[in-house]
Image (cartoon, coloured by chain):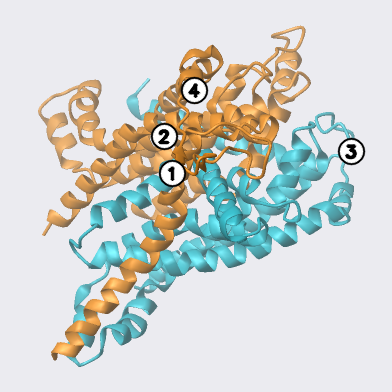
Amino acid sequence: MSAGKIVKGMSALALIFLYAPILWIVVYSFNESQLVTVWSRFSTKWYAALLQDEQILRAARISLEVALLSATGATVLGTMVGYALARFGRFPGRTLFSGLVIAILAIPEIIMAISMLLLFVALESATGWPHRDVQTIVMAHITFSTAFVAVVVQTRVSELDVSLEEAAADLGARPLRVFFLVTLPLIAPALLSGWLLAFSLSLDDLVITSFVSGPSSTTLPMVVFSKVRLGLNPEINALGTLIILIVSLVAALSLLRTMFRRRGA
Amino acid sequence: MSVSETRKRALGRFLVIAIPFIWLGALFLAPFLIVAKISLSTAAVAIPPYEPLISWAEDGALVLTLHVGNYKLIFSDPVYLIAYASSLRNAAVTVVFTLLLGYPLAYFIATRRENWRAPLLLLVMLPFWTSFLIRIYAWIGILKPNGVINGVLIWLGLIDKPLMILNTNFAVAVGMVYGYLPFMVLPLYAHLEKMDWSLLEAARDLGAKPARVFREVTLPLSAPGIVAGSLLVFIPAVGEYIVPALLGGPDTLTIGATLWNEFFSNRDWPVASTVAVALIALLVAPLLALQHHRAKGVKTMSDKP
């Protein structure tokens, strides 16, 4: 067997491995039987059940609220971090700054979960604030998402042609004007993908959220986790299929956009 | 540029750095000090459930009490040592198998025509954007006794009764490799893609066989990608909680589960903090390696004309 065939075979295997669970989720979301793995016949009843599940709907609303707020906050902070790392050269504390970003990206979630819980508890017992609910979840999500946005923005800004910004500055525009009129429109696609990444990370997070949430702020992953620990549940397959559908649509749109852009260029 | 303008610009730069720095410092760095502090305390029936380190004695003296008992406990009680060992083993297994599966895939994508690479990369990333929890849950349905794999094997007549795959270390390994594969493929791809492919051609033209070209040219050139990918998989994998919780058996003991249970069931926060401090200490070296590696990568990129 040639080397090329081995590479192709292994790649096919890896892709099957990545997509087998997704296929399983979608197929069995249309299974009528409560016993997920035993196929009886085609049915959409678990979608109807999902849309009537008050616990899931309530958690989904909380999760969406948290994701919207934290993705927006993380995009603002992450853009600052990414821009500073790409454009400010060697400033004092740069190593610490970039080290912070990498540490947040790589460190096990459970460590951040515990440290933020202990921070919030210590703060609350000392000052009476913050109460553990949606606000503490949003603060925690902003913290880890900022690092992801920063990497996306840093990559894009360092690819930018500096001469455009220099031209604007030479023509007398102040730094803030240059940023908002020249840099920002150029990096807008990166900001959008950073925002979407932060949004999906927030919507997906279980470990950190479980530690920093309060009794009134149960998010979607927390409900899903409590259900799947009890075993297979066709409603979860239906929920998974909906998420897969939305993510595929967004991904297809972004792919079409980059392909059309390349053709136009 | 006038003096006031230069000053304004300096202030602007300062704010762009200071605002996120204060946020990350307060919510990511400072809490580690609190974790370290609480690891030196003892559990108490109170809110918060630990004793303060500093207290007033009856004679009005300020007393600082540091308990090192928690550290003695986690180094002597085999439960903790077993949990660390099995977490490190899980992470190492994950690195090896994501590398074996991810390297050919990254190589395959990097050697496609340019307009094929973006869609293929998207195909690798797409699962990463959909619920990790639900994708790991899917493996329960695939691996369980009456699940897909056993169904197929029985139908093929290869086995008579279902294999016990779910709730074993093997199932945990499958789930971990599955969950972390994209983290390996992306850095590998990034390094393979910017590799100088003419060197491979030169080696081939000089008569080297494919295996030798791979061993002596491709592999050394892509080594930085292997290091970056391995660290990016290893570090978070050591603390993984969800995969062992859903696919592991009742005897699957990991650091992630230990920490989770100490907080939610035992409510011994000082012991949990100690376990966390030890885990952080374990991960400092790999984190520094990752940081060093990345700084080096950025430098070589900016060295290019």
Q: Chain B, which colour?
A: orange
Q: Chain of mark 2?
A: B
State the mark number for residue B280. 2
Do the dots labelled 1 and 4 sit on one chain?
A: yes
Q: Amino acid at mark 3?
A: Arg
Q: Quadrant of residue B241?
A: top right
The crowding category of the residue bearing disc 3, from other C-alpha atoms within 10 Å (few below 14, some 14 to 19, many at least 20), is few
Which labelled disc corresponds to residue A157?
Answer: none
Q: Counting residues from the N terminus, which is met first, the one under dot 2 or under dot 1?
A: 1
Subunit of label 3: A
Tell which circle, 2 or 4, labels the residue nearer the N-terminal end. Answer: 4
Identify the residue position indicated by label 1 in the image: B32
Q: CA distance from mark 3 to mark 1?
A: 53 Å
Same-chain check, marks 2 and 1: yes
Residue designated by label 4 = B69
Q: Compare residues B201 and B19 and report the one nearer the observer.
A: B19
Chain assignment, label 1: B
Crowd rating for badge 2 (residues with CA inside 10 Å; few <14, some 14–19, many 20+): some
Q: Are marks 2 and 1 in contact (CB under 8 Å)?
A: yes
Q: Is residue B298 left or right of residue A44?
A: left
Instruction: Classify B52 as above or below A70.
Output: above
